[in-house]
Image: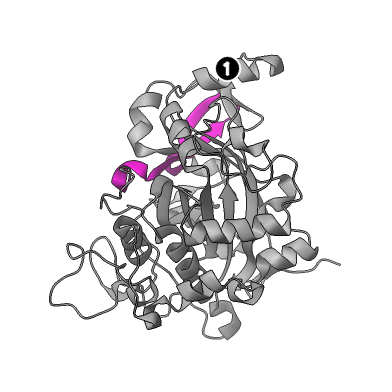
């Protein structure tokens, strides 16, 4: 990402930017005041993203059904089949299981159904292949890799698009972190895993052409238009030692009225979006941070998402294992297999809508369309392709590299 003044702003801690509402969130537990929270969201951030419940807003945290009555330990240290205890010395946050807790929220949609399924678009066969089934021979054989990830488009189903128009805004949080499979006592620096994280606001396309800061409740975006996300220059990059790491994200709708999230978004809109088409607004960016520091940024994002009951999931996942090398796949057989190309994420509850429709496809401007569709056919083809399903398209570039102390590429100059 470029290092201009706006990049500095989106990379700065919220408290330093003078947002009193966010400072109240950060110190919410000491205020003694309770607030309305979406309990299912709190469970997600506590049990899947590794945020200690004591750092979440009062009234939030693990639900009584999720907490063993006799346990006094913090949720991130609990050991269970769905939340195994991290190995000694490992730097890992949250569970390796991606399931969102199926605790209802007021908006009605959450749980296992909004956990994403990832597919890789094989451009030679014009077919979507489950990301866990990408052939090993199509990956780099071994070694360190550099991954550039760009969220390209969010295509909402008609139902989700209508809901999103009513909420008038939403958010996407995504982080990637390194994962060390073997410790190297002779090189202490190599034991510190790094991560990259980003929080952005998203808006319905129908509202994007309106004046800056408009909420336009009731505006319904056209599903065929989709929501443009990151530009190429906004892609996140991270080096993965041995080609393995973790990916986690949360994508949600959130009404900007009477919520800390709305106050946060409005503050950044006041600073200026530098965009004539407001559909994607990056707010907080940490391009390089020590992985343990993700607890801090996840705490902030989790509190922003759960504050108030005006919430609905689009998709969300706790940390997922990813591998860019054939060697890494041998150690992480259930991990997502990453190679250069396009991936899409689809909510599990939309799986029936794409069953037997995974062939004869190509990607055009971030949208899935029939392989025979021409450039001028895009607008008409998009709503008819995987009709009724929500999906996010993601562009990846994976290339071999040599990491210095498992952190940064070694300079070749």
Where disc 1 sits, the SS reads: helix
- Residue at position x 48%, y 77% in the image: 183
Q: For residue 54, which quarter of the picture? A: bottom left
- The residue positioned farthest toward the left in the image shown: 70
Kindly tell me whether residue 149 is visible in this rendering: no
Left or right: where does residue 110 sit relative to residue 298? left
Which residue corresponds to mark 1? Answer: 381
Extent of the magenta region: 110-134
Task: Say which of 70 and 149 sits in front.
Answer: 70
- Residue at position x 18%, y 77% in the image: 71
Q: For residue 373, which quarter of the picture? A: top right
Figure check: 52 above or below 305: below
Q: Locate residue 107, reporting x and y percent.
A: 34, 44
Residue neighbourhood size for the residue with mark 1, other residues' Cα within 10 Å, grouped as few (<14), some (14–19), many (≥20):
some
Left or right: where does residue 333 sit relative to residue 223? left
Task: Say which of 255 and 233 sits in front.
Answer: 255
Task: Say which of 312 and 1 sits in front.
Answer: 312
Picture quarter with the C terminus: bottom right
Picture quarter with the N terminus: bottom right
Figure check: 373 above or below 353: above
Q: Locate residue 86, reporting x and y percent.
A: 35, 72
Q: Locate residue 23, reporting x and y percent.
A: 52, 75
């Amino acid at each position: 990402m470029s290092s201009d003044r706006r990049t500095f702003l989106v990379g700065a801690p919220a408290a330093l930017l003078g947002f009193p509402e966010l400072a109240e969130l950060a110190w919410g537990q000491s205020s003694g005041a309770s607030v309305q929270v979406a309990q299912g969201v709190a469970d997600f951030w506590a049990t899947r993203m590794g945020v200690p419940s004591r750092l979440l807003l009062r009234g939030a945290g693990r639900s009584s059904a999720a907490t063993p009555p006799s346990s006094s330990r913090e949720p991130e240290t609990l050991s269970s089949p769905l939340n195994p205890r991290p190995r000694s010395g490992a730097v890992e946050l949250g569970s390796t299981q991606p399931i969102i807790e199926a605790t209802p929220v007021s908006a009605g949609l959450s749980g296992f159904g909004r956990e994403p399924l990832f597919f890789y678009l094989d451009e030679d066969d014009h077919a979507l292949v489950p990301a866990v089934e990408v052939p090993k021979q199509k990956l780099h054989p071994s070694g360190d890799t550099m991954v550039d990830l760009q969220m390209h488009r969010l295509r909402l189903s008609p139902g989700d698009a209508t809901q999103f128009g009513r909420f008038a805004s939403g958010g996407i949080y995504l982080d990637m972190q390194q994962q060390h499979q073997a410790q190297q006592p002779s090189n202490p620096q190599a034991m510190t895993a790094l991560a990259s994280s980003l929080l952005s606001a998203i808006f319905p396309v129908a509202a994007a052409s309106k004046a800056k800061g408009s909420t336009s409740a009731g505006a319904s975006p056209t599903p065929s238009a989709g929501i443009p996300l990151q530009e190429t220059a906004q892609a996140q990059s991270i080096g993965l030692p041995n080609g393995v790491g973790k990916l986690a994200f949360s994508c949600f709708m959130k009404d900007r009225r009477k919520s800390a999230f709305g106050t946060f978004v409005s503050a950044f809109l006041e600073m200026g979006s530098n965009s004539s088409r407001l559909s994607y607004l990056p707010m907080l960016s940490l391009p390089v941070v020590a992985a343990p520091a993700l607890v801090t940024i996840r705490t902030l994002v989790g509190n922003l998402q759960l504050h108030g009951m005006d919430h609905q999931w689009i998709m969300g996942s706790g940390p997922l294992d990813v591998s860019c090398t054939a060697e890494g796949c041998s150690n992480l057989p259930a991990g997502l297999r990453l190679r250069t190309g396009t991936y899409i994420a689809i909510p599990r509850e939309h799986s029936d809508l794409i069953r037997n429709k995974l062939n004869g496809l190509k990607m055009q401007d971030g949208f899935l369309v029939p392989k025979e569709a021409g450039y001028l056919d895009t607008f008409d083809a998009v709503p008819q392709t995987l009709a009724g399903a929500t999906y996010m398209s993601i562009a990846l570039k994976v290339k071999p590299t040599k990491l210095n102390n498992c952190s940064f590429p070694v300079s070749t100059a």
